[in-house]
Each structure stands twice: as C-alpha cells, then as structure tokens.
Amino acid sequence: MTGREILHKMKVKAGFGTSGCDRGKGKSKMSKNITHGFHLMKGKSAHAMEDYVVSKFKQEKDKELGLFAIFDGHLGHDVASYLQNNLFDNILKQEDFWTETESAVKRAYLITDDKILEQSFELGRGGSTAVTAILINGQKLVVANVGDSRAVLSKNGKPKQLSIDHEPSKEKNMIESRGGFVSNIPGDVPRVDGKLAVARAFGDKSLKMHLTSEPDVIVENVEEGTEFLILASDGIWKVMSNQEAVDCIRKAKDAQAAAKRLIEEAVARNSKDDISCIIVKFQ
C-alpha cells in the first residue's frame, strides 16, 4: 500500500474530505440508527478542488457530538482547509457552548474569521463559505452558515431548509451600509463590488469591509419522522430544488450512496461546479 493510500484511509476514518479524499462514512455509537456519509466531486473548472468537508462523531465530555460541515473555497483552497482544521475546535472552546449554544457558535465564527484575516499573507486573498451542523446526542441539531452552501432536513418526505442563502441581492442594504455595492450585470449573477457572488464569507480580506462572516444559526430538534439531513455546496442547489434533492435520495441504501447519488444527479443536470455533499440518516 502506498503512502497516499494510507493517508487516504486515515482521512476517511477521521471523517475528513478533500480533493484527495472524496468519500467516507460512519455511524453514531450512541444510536446505531444514525449514520453519515460524504462524497465530493471535482468540477470542470481549471483550478484545483476547493471544497473541504468534516463528517464525523466524537465524544465531548459525557455527550456525543456529530460534527458535519462543508467549506466551499474560492480564489484558492487555503481558507477552506483552515476552516476544516480549526472551526469546530474554536466552537467547542467557547465556555458557554453547552448553555448558550447559538451565541457561542456565532462568536466562534467571528473569532475564526479574525484569525484567518490575521494570517492572510499565508492563506492568500481568497475565502470560503461554510455550512456546519452539530448533532448533540442524536437529538438536537445546531446549524449555522455563511454563504450559499445549504442545509436541508427531510421530514416525512418534505424538505425543511435550515440555512439561509446569503445572496448579494438579498443583502444589498447591508452591503451598501458598509460602503460597498452590488453589481447586476446582464448574463451574470449579482456580486459584491462586482466580484463575489455571496454576501457573507470567511476571508476575502480585500472585500471584508463590505462583507460579514456572522452566521445565521438555527436549532432544530430531531423528532419522529425526521429522515435525513443534507449538507451540500451550491453546485447542487444551482440545479435542484430542495424537494427534488429529497426525492432523489429518499430510497438510497445508505448515507454515502445517497451523497454520491445526489452529486451524480446534479452533474446529469449539467452542474459544472465543484460539488460536496454530506448525508446524515436518522432512520
């Protein structure tokens, strides 16, 4: 076995995905019914793969946490890689995480962005979106996001979106209040200062005066009828509705197969972007 193959297996076991580790799966030790799987696929762009994921369970004190995240980088992959390695650690370091979870997650996002900006010389001028989900004891989901990667929960075959797409056109007032502008050129998507197609992101030092990295945070209980959670980058949501995504994978045999199936469907619909997807199955 080569060194690269050994590293690949270690990354899969640890629940990390990059361009060198494009799939993986696992399950909860607390509830054997809860499983997870991820899949990534390089898009048709000339640059290297810029998506990173975290998909794993870990014990934290007397609780089991499912940690799931997709980081969709732009103008380079270093910021997304940094987030993969540091964001959850920064969240769990917050002393009030267990008592004031929403505020702790918001604070950790902002702290992490400050650290990224301080290291912009090493990490480069790029940035990354993020969608994160923390599953606490298999019973409560804490979902946060900046950018346009999305979290969708399926309940009895019906989708419930747990994240907010931070599109420049929707946050025009906020961007303009910071001194920026939103371009709307025919044939192109709205962009912050004519450059970035999302209104919130980590990094992007040159645009940070007109952006924010403050996440939206939603807490959702896992109730009867909850089937699975989808976390996916915008390469899926550009070509599929929430309902179409749920219908596509509802009969998949396992979580990893579901993630792969969803990406294959997006590609069949002519999605050209890098695509990453995590599925957490509750039944």
Image: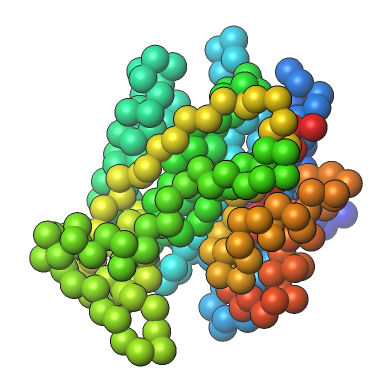
From the viewer's perspective, tell me whether residue 110 is left or right of residue 99.
left
Residue 147, image quadrant: bottom left
- Give the percent coordinates (x, y) of residue 118: 25, 51
Q: Is residue 47 above or below residue 204?
A: below
| Farthest residue, direction top | 62
Front residue of 20/247: it is 247
Residue shown at 84%/44% (left/top)? 254
Q: Is residue 210 visible?
A: no
Front residue of 253/129: it is 253
Residue 203, image quadrant: bottom left
Total tally of numbered discs in the picture: 0
Q: Is residue 4 above or below residue 239?
A: above
Residue shown at 31%/66% (left/top)? 168
| Farthest residue, direction bottom | 186
Residue shown at 44%/41% (left/top)? 144
From the viewer's perspective, tell me whether residue 195 is left or right of residue 78.
left
Front residue of 207/185: it is 185
- Give the percent coordinates (x, y) of residue 247: 75, 55
- Give the percent coordinates (x, y) of residue 122: 35, 60
Q: Which quadrant: the C terminus?
A: top right
Q: How is the image coloured?
A: rainbow
